[in-house]
Structure formats: C-alpha cells, structure tokens
Image (cartoon, rainbow, N blue to C red):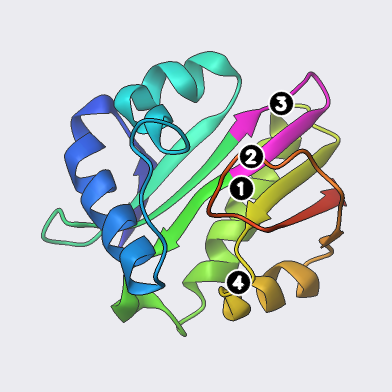
Amino acid sequence: MTLRPATNGDRDDVETLIFTILRTYGLEPSPDSTDADLADIEGNYPRNGGIFDVVEARDGTVVGTVAVHRTSDSLCELRKMYLAEELRGHGWGKRLLDHAIEKAKALGYKSMWLETANSLEVAHRLYKQNGFEAWEAPHQSARCDFAMKRDL
C-alpha cells in the first residue's frame, strides 16, 4: 500500500470508492453539494491550503482517502476519510487520522474539526480515542448529524 497525494486524474476512482462506501452505510452521495469538491481535488485541497491523499494498492486501485480542508488560517476540517472494507480493522484508519493531523500541524493549523454521521460508530470511537470532542458546528452536509473538534 502506498499513501500519496491525489490528483484530478484520481477523481473517478476516488468517487467510486467514496460513493460505494456511503451507500453501504445507507448514506447518499451528494455530487452537487457535499461531494462537489471532488470535481477539482487539486484546486479544492492543495491549492487551497490543504491536502487530499489516497491509499493506493499495489495494483493501482484507490482503496482509501483522507483530506484536510482549510476553514480559516487556524482551523481546518478533516474530510473524506474512507477505507475500502478490506483495509478496515488493520490500523489504516488510525494511520490516516495520524497522517491528517501531522499534515495539518505542518500546514500551521491549530485546530481540526469534522462532521460525520452517528451511524458510523467505528469512526466515532476512533475520533474520540484521538482527542476529538463533540462540537456545535454549522453543519454543511445533509448526511452528517454530528460534529467534533480537537486542538492540534
């Protein structure tokens, strides 16, 4: 497995992975709103003060994603952290979260927040175990019903 920066050329593979996982949990993709950022990964992430990285299998398949998106000079949002089923339960979620936190620190952010759905219980546990706490945030995504934040 290789963790590398995503490019716009990864868009189709990234969308396929994310949309498939969302549907597995009964959540609908939103290509015209919440997921519109995937139309220009490079412009919405690295060129805007963030990162968007993918986990690539040996055969070139995208099997994971993680992103850090600029909210303000000191605050960033953890976005698009998804793993293919075969990677879950093997420490990849923790690796991606640690990676995102380290990248956010290196970019100068002081805090990180995220939105998620309560139905994603394993993700909630991971976030809580890593210092995220419930936070009242203006929810941007219709499929998310819970926000968390932590200092970096």
Neighbours of disc 4 within 10 Å: few (<14), some (14-19), many (20+) = some
Residue range highlighted in magenta: 69-78
71 left or right of 117 in image: right
* SS of the residue under disc 2: helix
Neighbours of disc 2 within 10 Å: few (<14), some (14-19), many (20+) = some
Q: Relative to 60, is 9 above or below?
A: above
Identified by mark 1, the residue type is: Ala
Main SS, magenta residues = strand
Q: Relative to 10, is 15 above or below?
A: below
Identified by mark 4, the residue type is: Ala
Residue designated by label 1:
100
Residue designated by label 3:
71
* N-terminal-most mark, 2 or 3: 3
| Contact check, label 1 and label 2, Cβ < 8 Å | yes
* N-terminal-most mark, 3 or 1: 3
The quadrant where residue 55 appears: bottom left
Residue at the farthest left position? 59
60 left or right of 85 in image: left
Q: Nearer the viewer, residue 43 or 121?
A: 121
Instruction: Find the distance from the CA under tag 1 to the CA under tag 2.
Output: 5 Å
Q: Position of residue 23 (x, y in %)?
A: 32, 65
Residue designated by label 2:
103
Instruction: Find the distance from the CA under tag 3 to the CA under tag 1.
Output: 15 Å
Q: Position of residue 115 (x, y in %)?
A: 66, 51
* N-terminal-most mark, 2 or 4: 2
Location of the N terminus (image quadrant): bottom left
